Image (cartoon, rainbow, N blue to C red):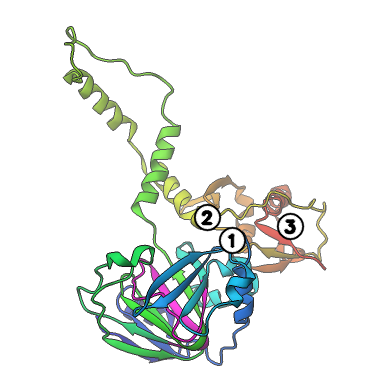
């Protein structure tokens, strides 16, 4: 698998045909004239917050590695040395909705695959070591320069047991050495070994697209099966006196096997529901719903400005248009609201008058109110 290099973001059809999940590609000036909208100090400020997931990696291949999890105090971050450290902050797209326009460049990919925008800031030499990701990732250079080493060797994915939670790779051999400038972007399919090293202070944005894990789908399915199981105690099937042993008698074992097989029967409708619930669940167990939401004006002023919560995950099944999955929960919706749903699940910001609620009747008003009360849409201050 070789590495391609092109200039400018290709058309979606070409990208999907030539690169997506096939080969890495360096896209020079994918974001032409990119101006980073957030400073390194602002990123570091996010890592001070209790609710923000962050990590600090210090060291190098020569001296070894140290990993610490946030939140961090200001003294720790201001006391960092001049080189060889990287600070990573997850879910920045959900923390700073104003960065969401960057994600609009990737709307040709399934929205349910989008994981998050992670931002890393690093001092000269800063790195997290040679590793591989189990998801598709776009690495956008936002500020400064970063060198990316790629290894296309077939055995380079063997993990070094001494790497601990960093899951570093051993026998990493560089096949491509790339220096990215602001606006350049590197796409890597799952499993490609890579090693990023800051060339001076820099900031890198990682846009990850994660596929579902079979274990997650199975967990959702089994939960559904358990919920619909009859609440009864199964009897045994003794056909003769039981010996004084711990052996399970064959007749009872056969009956219990058959019971489990019957219980695990699932039609397409149940499987589809479990898939939608699993795919729509908030990443990392985070729910965008709010515990305390201000009272919703009734009626809503036509000029009120609304913004969609970027942490909310919406999903619909094909040909099942009366269900909308909101963070994995199935909502039954009125067919009259289909056009309204299209707007509320796609647009990021709008005015109440843009929704034309009068066209959707009481069902449309209730749907919008439910989304606002759950914190899935926000009413912006004047």
Above or below — where is 22 with respect to 238? below
Residue that numbered label 1 is attached to: 311
Residue at the (59%, 85%) spot, across then down: 36
Residue 332 seen from this side? yes
Residue at the (64%, 71%) spot, across then down: 74
Quadrant where the C terminus lies?
bottom right
- Picture coordinates of residue 30 (x, y %)? 47, 87
Please state the extent of the stretch shown in magenta in the rendering.
118-146
Horizontal relation, residue 177 to residue 300: left or right? left
Residue that numbered label 3 is attached to: 357
Residue that numbered label 2 is attached to: 282
Q: Nearer the viewer, mark 3 or mark 2?
A: 2
* CA neighbours of label 3 inside 10 A, class few (<14), some (14 to 19), many (20+): some
- Picture coordinates of residue 338 (x, y %)? 60, 56
* CA neighbours of label 1 inside 10 A, class few (<14), some (14 to 19), many (20+): many
Mark found first going from the N terminus, 1 or 3: 1
Horizontal relation, residue 263 to residue 359: left or right? left
Answer whether labels 1 and 2 touch (C-beta < 8 Å): yes
Above or below — where is 32 with respect to 92? below
Mark found first going from the N terminus, 3 or 2: 2
Residue 269 seen from this side? no
Quick check: is 129 in the magenta stretch?
yes
- Picture coordinates of residue 15 (x, y %)? 38, 80
Q: CA distance from mark 3 to mark 2?
A: 28 Å
Q: Nearer the viewer, mark 1 or mark 3?
A: 1
- Picture coordinates of residue 302 (x, y %)? 81, 63
| Number of on-image labels | 3
**Residue 252 occupies quadrant:** top left
Kind of element beneath mark 2: loop
Residue at the (79%, 64%) spot, across then down: 304
């Amino acid at each position: 698998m070789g590495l391609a290099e092109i200039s400018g973001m290709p058309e979606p059809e070409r990208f999907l045909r030539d690169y997506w999940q096939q080969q890495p590609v360096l896209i020079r000036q994918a974001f032409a004239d990119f101006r980073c909208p957030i400073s390194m100090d602002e990123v570091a400020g996010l890592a001070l917050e209790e609710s923000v997931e962050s990590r600090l990696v210090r060291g190098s291949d020569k001296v070894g590695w140290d990993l610490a999890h946030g939140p961090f105090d200001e003294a720790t971050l201001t006391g960092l040395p001049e080189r060889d450290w990287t600070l990573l902050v997850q879910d920045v797209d959900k923390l700073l909705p104003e960065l969401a326009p960057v994600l609009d460049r990737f709307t040709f990919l399934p929205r349910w695959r989008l994981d998050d925008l992670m931002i890393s800031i690093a001092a000269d030499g800063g790195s997290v070591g040679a590793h591989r990701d189990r998801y598709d990732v776009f690495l956008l250079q936002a500020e400064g320069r970063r060198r990316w080493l790629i290894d296309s060797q077939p055995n380079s994915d063997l993990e070094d047991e001494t790497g601990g939670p960093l899951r570093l790779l051993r026998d990493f051999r560089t096949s491509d050495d790339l220096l990215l400038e602001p606006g350049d972007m590197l796409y890597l399919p799952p499993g490609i070994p890579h090693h990023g090293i800051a060339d001076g202070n820099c900031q890198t944005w990682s846009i990850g697209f994660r596929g579902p894990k079979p274990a997650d789908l199975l967990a959702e399915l089994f939960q559904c099966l358990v919920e619909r199981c009859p609440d009864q105690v199964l009897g045994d099937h003794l056909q003769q006196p039981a010996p004084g042993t711990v052996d399970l008698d064959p007749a009872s074992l056969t009956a219990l096997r058959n019971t489990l097989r019957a219980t695990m029967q699932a039609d397409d409708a149940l499987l589809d529901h479990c898939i939608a619930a699993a795919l729509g669940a908030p990443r990392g167990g985070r729910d965008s719903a709010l515990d305390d939401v201000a009272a919703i004006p009734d009626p809503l002023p036509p000029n009120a400005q609304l913004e969609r919560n970027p942490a909310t995950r919406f999903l619909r099944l094909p040909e099942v248009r009366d269900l909308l999955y909101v963070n994995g929960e199935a909502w039954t919706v009125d067919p009259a609201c289909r056009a309204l749903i299209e707007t509320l699940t796609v647009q990021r910001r709008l005015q109440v008058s843009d929704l034309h609620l009068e066209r959707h009747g009481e069902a449309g008003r209730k749907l919008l109110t439910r989304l606002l009360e759950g914190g899935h849409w926000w009413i912006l201050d004047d």
